[in-house]
Image: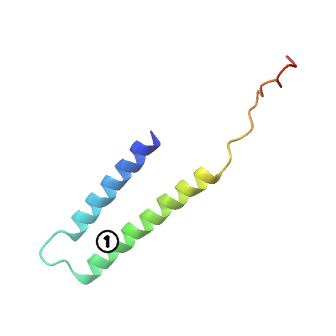
């Protein structure tokens, strides 16, 4: 499900960039704004992804008994 969400985010990001750059000779300010938004979005999503993957899972509320003690 996480991979699907990342792919959906990437498709939406690229489509937003294409819409922002569409038109007859997009202005330099608009191109800069689109690329800044794309960069910030990528940094935010990738930073969040790294933080989530680097965080260890929480301890179980119901730990399994040690072997040969149950």
The answer to which image quadrant residue 15 occupies is bottom left
> Residue beneath label 1, please?
34
Work out whether 39 lies above or below 45: below
Work out whether 4 lies above or below 15: above
Q: Position of residue 30 (x, y in %)?
A: 27, 77
Quadrant occupied by the C terminus: top right
Which residue is at the far left? 24
Q: Position of residue 13 (x, y in %)?
A: 33, 59
Which residue is at the far top? 70
Label 1: element kind:
helix
Q: Position of residue 62 (x, y in %)?
A: 76, 27
Work out whether 66 lies above or below 47: above
Q: Position of residue 18 (x, y in %)?
A: 23, 64
Which residue is at the far right? 69
Q: Residue at (85%, 19%) from the top-left corner?
A: 68
Work out whether 4 lies above or below 16: above
Quadrant occupied by the N terminus: top left
Nearest the eye: 59 or 20: 59
């Amino acid at each position: 499900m996480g991979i699907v969400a990342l792919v959906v985010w990437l498709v939406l990001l690229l489509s937003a960039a294409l819409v922002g750059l569409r038109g007859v000779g997009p202005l330099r300010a608009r191109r800069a704004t689109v690329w800044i938004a794309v960069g910030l979005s990528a940094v935010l999503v990738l930073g969040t992804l790294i933080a989530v993957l680097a965080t260890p899972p929480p301890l179980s509320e119901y730990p399994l008994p040690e072997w040969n003690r149950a």
